[in-house]
């Protein structure tokens, strides 16, 4: 192609096209990710990190395209990319792993901010989801930061529950075990008595189920339904305490 003031017109047109495409992609991805962040109820910090990440990726792609248009051979581009990638990988392997894991969590959405979750042995309310860490407020009022890379290796339980009329509730479950000194009929009566006292303040009456039994004990799973996840912090110990107090009374009567 003819030169313009000593510059190849092909290179000029290539630069213009690459710049226009890069700007257009940046605008499209920014708008889409902003809407996605609102739908997913992401923290502003996490949303900004996500947008920044895609902007950097678009910039890198544009620079590679400009280098190719400028006459660099594919072998040179591959070599530069390999060297840069290896150096970056050795320098920040764990950071990159957390970053990729964070992108996966944001896309898969196994939980959202304000969900009540159990991640491995950590249990509580999700306060923030960033590219690198997820912060969980536990029942002890401690803020635990879990790296996103660790989250992918742990079992995740989300206690979100779809109630009647599409209402969003949290169905929290916990186990209570008893020995065989008190009959199952008495234990059922204890549960019903305790649940009746809490029914008026909850969106749905608590329930229970016998999940396993052996020669030493019977274990029941208790289901508590709440609208606000922070209510679990007070309801779990309160219900368990009331159940055990009534069980102690029944056990004392059996012993006498």
Image (spheres, rainbow, N blue to C red):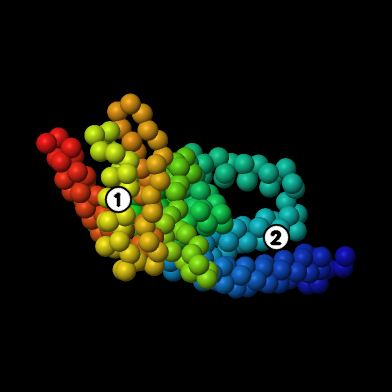
- At 65% from the left edge and 42% from the top edge, which residue is drawn? 79
Quadrant of the rendered image containing residue 70:
bottom right
Viewed as shown, does residue 253 lie left or right of 118? Answer: left
Give the label, 2 or 1, closer to the camera: 1
Q: Residues within 10 Å of mark 1 (few under 14, many from 20)?
A: few
Element under label 1? helix
Element under label 2? helix
For the question of whether residue 235 can be seen, the reply is yes
Please, is residue 235 above or below residue 214 in the view?
Answer: below
- At 41% from the left edge and 60% from the top edge, which residue is drawn? 170
Viewed as shown, does residue 253 lie left or right of 164? Answer: left
Q: Position of residue 122 (x, y in %)?
A: 34, 46
Please, is residue 217 above or below residue 3 in the view?
Answer: above
Q: Position of residue 254 (x, y in %)?
A: 18, 37
Task: Using the image as rendered, state which of residue 77 and residue 137 is in the foreground.
Answer: 137
Residue 157 marker: none
Specify the farthest residue to the right.
1
For the question of whether residue 144 can be seen, the reply is no
Q: Position of residue 255 (x, y in %)?
A: 14, 35
- At 77% from the left edge and 65% from the top edge, which residue is drawn? 14
Q: Residues within 10 Å of mark 2 (few under 14, many from 20)?
A: some
Task: Using the image as rendered, state which of residue 159 and residue 12 is in the foreground.
Answer: 159
Specify the farthest residue to the top.
215
Going from N to C along the chain, the mark reached first, 2 or 1, is 2
- Residue position for label 2: 66
Q: Position of residue 9 (x, y in %)?
A: 81, 68
- Residue position for label 1: 189
Quick one: quadrant of the C terminus?
top left
- At 58% from the left edge and 61% from the top edge, which residue is drawn? 54
């Amino acid at each position: 192609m003819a030169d313009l003031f000593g510059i190849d017109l092909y290179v000029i047109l290539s630069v213009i096209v690459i710049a226009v495409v890069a700007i257009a992609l940046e605008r499209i991805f920014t708008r889409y990710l902003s809407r996605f962040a609102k739908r997913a109820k992401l923290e502003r910090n996490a949303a900004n990190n996500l947008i920044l990440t895609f902007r950097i990726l678009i910039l890198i792609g544009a620079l590679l395209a400009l280098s190719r248009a400028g006459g660099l051979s594919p072998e040179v581009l591959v070599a530069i990319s390999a060297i840069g990638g290896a150096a970056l990988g050795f320098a920040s392997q764990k950071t990159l792993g957390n970053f990729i894991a964070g992108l996966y969590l944001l896309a898969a959405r196994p939980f959202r901010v304000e969900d009540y979750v159990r991640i491995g042995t950590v249990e509580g309310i999700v306060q923030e989801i960033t590219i690198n860490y997820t912060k969980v407020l536990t029942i002890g009022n401690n803020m635990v930061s879990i790296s996103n890379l660790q989250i992918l290796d742990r079992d995740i339980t989300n206690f979100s529950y779809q109630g009647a009329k599409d209402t969003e509730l949290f169905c929290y479950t916990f186990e209570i075990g008893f020995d065989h000194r008190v009959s199952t009929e008495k234990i059922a009566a204890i549960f019903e008595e305790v649940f009746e006292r809490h029914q008026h303040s909850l969106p749905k009456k608590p329930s229970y189920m016998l999940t396993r039994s052996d020669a030493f004990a019977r274990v029941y799973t208790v289901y508590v339904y709440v609208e606000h996840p922070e209510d679990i912090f007070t309801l779990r110990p309160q219900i368990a305490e009331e159940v055990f107090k009534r069980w102690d009374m029944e056990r004392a009567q059996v012993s006498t």
